[in-house]
Image (spheres, grey):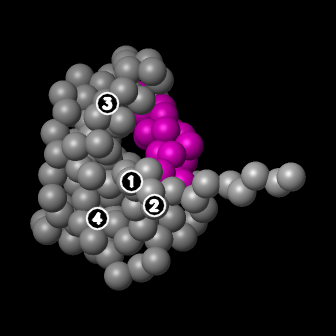
Amino acid sequence: MQRRLRLRRTVDFDQLRRGGQRWHHPMILLIAGENDLEHSRFGFAASRGFGNATARNRMKRILREIVRSRLSLIEDGWDCLFVARRAANGANFAEVEVAVNQLMKRSNLLKSRSDMRVPEVVK
């Protein structure tokens, strides 16, 4: 994922945790808040209670890849933080993908069909 699309500063994470809207799933928590940018930024977290470092890093990589594959479908101007919960420890890619899809739909962060760019047909 491009550097400009990542939440990196602690201040950004803290601000989002304090003032962002939350959507819950047994495996993942999504916290989102508007930003004043022309693109959305994403952060990924897993606490020490989630598991050992290997499990935490694996889950963050899975979340990052799921979001990266959907970047064109996500509204611009949002900061999003995905927090892995203990129930996700040991979950496979498909299970996590379903959870992320459900959260993105519930949060209305996906672009509507009319907003999506449809490639022009070349004759």
Q: Is residue 104 left or right of residue 71?
A: left
Nearer to us of marks 3 and 2 is 2
On the image, numbered disc 4 is attached to which residue?
Answer: 13
Q: Which mark is residue 14?
A: none
Badge 2: residue crowd in 10 Å (few <14, some 14–19, many ≥20)? few
Nearest the camera: 5 or 89? Answer: 5
C-alpha gap between disc 2 and disc 1: 5 Å
Amino acid carrying mark 1 in the image: Ser
Q: Quadrant of residue 55?
A: top left
On the image, numbered disc 2 is attached to which residue?
Answer: 115
C-alpha gap between disc 3 and disc 4: 21 Å
Amino acid carrying mark 4 in the image: Phe
Query: Which residue corresponds to the image point at 29% horizontal and 34% vertical from the top-left?
Result: 102
Q: Nearer the N terminus, badge 1 or badge 3?
A: 3
Q: Nearer the N terminus, badge 4 or badge 2?
A: 4
Badge 4 element: helix
Per the rendered image, the range of residues in magenta is: 55-73
Nearer to us of marks 4 and 1 is 1
Nearest the camera: 66 or 117? Answer: 117
On the image, numbered disc 3 is attached to which residue?
Answer: 99
Q: Is residue 72 magenta?
A: yes
